[in-house]
Structure formats: C-alpha cells, structure tokens
Amino acid sequence: MGKIAPNKPVKLIVGFIFKEKIFFERAKHTLTRHFGRIDFESGIIPFTATSYYEEELGLGLSRVFISFAKLIKPQQIAKIKVLTNRIEEKLSNGKKRSVNIDPGYLNLAKLVLASTKDYVHRIYLDKGIYAETTLFYQGKSFQDWKWTYPDFRNKEQIGIFNRIRELYAEQTKDK
C-alpha cells in the first residue's frame, strides 16, 4: 500500500487570448492582486491556431502566457478558474468577452489546465470545474497528447512552458 503524503506546491500559469491589449492588462493586474508577483511573461504571440474565439473576441487575436512567483496547492485550481471566469465576466461588454483567461499549473511532470467543459479526458474537481493534463514532460521537453489544444502544441509555446518549468525547478530544488 502506498503512503499518503501531502502534495507538493505547483506553479500557477495563466494564458490570455485577447484582441485589445487593455483587457489583457486589466485581467493581469487583477490576478496580480490575488497571486502576487509575475515571474514570467511571454511576449505577445499572434493567436492563429484556431478560429474558435473569433466570433466572440474578433479577428486579429493575440495570446500571452504568464506565471507567478508564488507557488500554489494544486487543489486551488478549481477556485482559481472560478475567479478567472468572474474576471472575464467583469471585463465583458454585454454577452461577449473581451479576454479569455485560461488558468492552469505545471510541475516537473505535467501541465494541467482547468476548464468548465467536461470531456472523456477531463476529471471533475469542484465548483463545476474540470482538469486535464494538457502536456507531459519527457525527453527534456513537454510533449502533447492527442487532445492538446493546437496552440499548446507548437514549438514556441512548448519553449515557453519549458522555460517556466525551469523556473519551477529552481524554486523547488531544495524542497
């Protein structure tokens, strides 16, 4: 029988999709009030992987990923997804969002995203939130699954997650 042990802290990451940078900045500012200092921010990446968000957010979308210096407990991700949904709602203009906010976390083995949508590869957490392992770490880099979102598969984003993983490894190396 395995011994039950406390879980290790994980690195909170957040992805944003937006048309107007001001909405990304407002969402990021709100999240820093909740989670503290950002220790990584990607540049602005053109979001061209899918047209899924164009009807709601418009054409010419951008994507940015951030991570926070303060580590979290993995079980917090459900509450964090509820919070990011509230932020999206607050920044929306009526029925359409101005920014899409995707929270998740990574550790040395995987990148996990939170979602409000159930599917065969997602596990229910709490408060209407599901989690999926979006990437796994093997052979000195993150690797994708068949269900991994297209923009999480490309080399640039994989490089971003590998860099955030390096930050996490430094933070946790003596723990």
Image: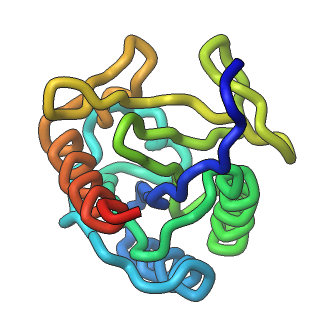
User: Is 76 rendered above or below residue 135?
Assistant: below
- Could you tell me residue 131's position as x and y percent? 63, 35
- Relative depth, front residue between 165 and 119: 165
Give the quarter of the figure containing the N terminus: top right
User: Is 131 rendered above or below residue 107?
Assistant: above
- Relative depth, front residue between 141 and 42: 141
- Could you tell me residue 151's position as x and y percent? 30, 35
User: Is 153 rendered above or below residue 27?
Assistant: above
Q: State how the image is colored.
A: rainbow
- Could you tell me residue 166's position as x and y percent? 21, 56
- Would residue 97 appear left or right of 145 to someone viewing this image? right
Residue at image location 26% in from the left, 39% down from the top = 48
The answer to whether residue 107 is seen in the rendering is yes
Give the quarter of the figure containing the C terminus: bottom left
Residue at image location 33% in from the left, 67% down from the top = 171
- Would residue 45 appear left or right of 90 to someone viewing this image? left
Q: How many marks?
A: 0
User: Which of the 4 quarters of the picture holds residue 134?
Assistant: top left
The answer to whether residue 64 is seen in the rendering is no
- Could you tell me residue 39's position as x and y percent? 31, 76
Residue at image location 48% in from the left, 42% down from the top = 53
- Would residue 22 appear left or right of 5 to someone viewing this image? left
User: Which of the 4 quarters of the picture holds residue 64?
Assistant: bottom left
